[in-house]
Image (spheres, grey):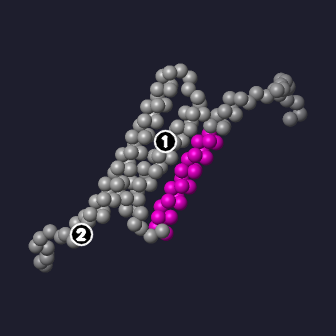
Amino acid sequence: MEHHTFGGEVTFPHAAPTDDSKKRIIKTTIILSVITIIELALGFWIYKMHEGGSPSHSLIMFLKGIIIILSLAKAFYIVSIFMHLGDEIRNLIMTIVVPLILFVWFIAAFLYEGNSWKNLRHEYRPKDPVKFEKTETPVHH
């Protein structure tokens, strides 16, 4: 039995990048760079506040929240542009995004619950602990 093989390499035709797609990639790269620079600046600011003494807890939490929002924006751009999810139909996007949101909520809920459990475990002090007296088991048992 004779095997038939291809004489050359198999290639798939694809179009060269257009000026529009190049502009889109450059715009996205600039946006990601600016967001990263802002995140780094906020991180260094938080670091300097910790060096200077006791910083305001609410300001630190606010800045960390901004960093998280900026990170989510970067993730959106990366998934939308470089992974081409922005070009897909809405139903495909929802099958990816909705489970991801539920998974993030799941993690946040368990972290919150675990922290609550830890705090309650260390704070629980019964006011009148039950005192157990030593008793003898009756003979007839």
| Residue for point 39% across, 54% down | 78
Image-based side of 7 in relation to 41, left or right: left
Q: Quadrant of residue 13?
A: bottom left
Q: CA distance from mark 2 to mark 1?
A: 38 Å
Element marked by disc 1: helix
Location of the N terminus by quadrant is bottom left
Element marked by disc 2: loop
| Residue for point 37% across, 59% down | 81
Q: Looking at the picture, does residue 102 appear above or below residue 56? A: below
The secondary structure that dominates the magenta segment is helix
Image-based side of 112 in relation to 138, left or right: left
Q: Which mark is residue 109?
A: none
Q: Is residue 132 visible?
A: no
| Residue for point 46% across, 26% down | 48
Residue highlighted by disc 1: 67
Q: Which residues are magenta?
A: 91-114
Amino acid beneath label 1: Ile
Q: Looking at the picture, does residue 132 appear above or below residue 25? A: above
Q: Which mark is residue 15?
A: 2
Between 131 and 26, the residue placed more toward the observer is: 26
How far across and down, in percent of the image, does residue 26 sit? 31, 54
Image-based side of 114 in relation to 80, left or right: right
The question of residue 95 being in magenta is answered with yes
How far across and down, in percent of the image, does residue 128 sit? 84, 26
Q: Are marks 2 and 1 in contact (CB under 8 Å)?
A: no
| Residue for point 53% across, 21% down | 53
Q: Residues within 10 Å of mark 2 (few under 14, many from 20)?
A: few
Q: Of label 2 and label 1, which has the lower sequence position? A: 2
Q: Looking at the picture, does residue 134 appear above or below residue 63? A: above
